[in-house]
């Protein structure tokens, strides 16, 4: 297991990317991806090989990102760890008493299979597990 990405909730990818690309000189992936199931737009920025930042912008007011920003403002949303088998990793954490947000993993950005664990169980940090596409 390794850190895959840091998710940052933003009101506007267009505005916030100026800091990450211009200020920090991070390289953005070629396009913004829409994850329709979560109603979010995602821009990935390379930090180093195998680690990136995801800027997360709500597609509408019902998006979990819109609700997060309304409650807490823009900022750190989650940490994501890459796993070989998200089903196995989810079951392992469940057997230890940690509660996933979803009973079964879902499709995420980049075609990954993902699941999240609630911050109430993970000491205040929303935690994502992500299995890359085969």
Image (spheres, grey):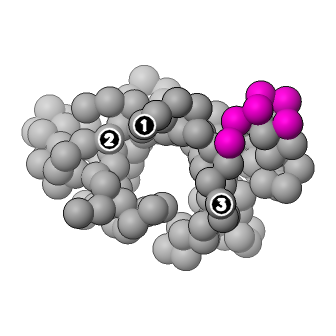
Marks 3 and 1, how far apart at CA: 16 Å
> Tag on residue 69?
none
Do residues under tags 2 and 1 come within 8 Å of each other at their CB atoms?
Answer: yes
> Tag on residue 82?
2
Which residue is the site of mark 3?
30
Foreground mark, 2 or 1, reads: 1
Q: Is residue 39 magenta?
A: no
Question: Helix or strand or loop: what does disc 3 sit on?
Answer: loop
Magenta part of the chain? 22-27
Question: Helix or strand or loop: what does disc 2 sit on?
Answer: strand
Q: Looking at the picture, how far across and down is residue 111, in whole percent?
A: 39, 66
Marks 2 and 3, how far apart at CA: 22 Å
Q: Looking at the picture, how far across and down is residue 93, in whole percent?
A: 19, 38
Foreground mark, 2 or 3, reads: 3
Q: Looking at the picture, how far across and down is residue 24, in whole percent?
A: 77, 28
Do residues under tags 3 and 1 come within 8 Å of each other at their CB atoms?
Answer: no
Residue shown at 85% from the left, 30% from the top: 23
Location of the N terminus by quadrant is top left
Is 26 positioned to the left or the right of 128 in the image? right
> Tag on residue 50?
1
Residue shown at 29% from the left, 62% from the top: 133
* Mark 3 surroundings: few (<14), some (14-19) or many (≥20) residues within 10 A: few
Q: Is residue 7 above or below residue 58?
A: above
């Amino acid at each position: 297991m390794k850190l895959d990405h840091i998710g940052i909730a933003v009101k506007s990818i267009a505005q916030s990317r100026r800091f990450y690309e211009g200020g920090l000189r991070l390289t953005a992936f070629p396009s913004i991806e829409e994850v329709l199931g979560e109603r979010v737009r995602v821009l990935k920025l390379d930090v180093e090989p195998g680690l990136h930042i995801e800027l997360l912008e709500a597609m509408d007011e019902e998006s979990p990102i819109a609700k997060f920003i309304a409650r807490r403002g823009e900022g750190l949303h989650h940490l994501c760890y890459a796993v070989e088998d998200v089903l196995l990793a989810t079951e392992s954490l469940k057997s230890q008493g940690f509660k996933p947000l979803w009973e079964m993993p879902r499709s995420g950005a980049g075609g990954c299979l993902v699941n999240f664990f609630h911050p109430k169980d993970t000491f205040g940090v929303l935690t994502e597990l992500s299995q890359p596409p085969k």
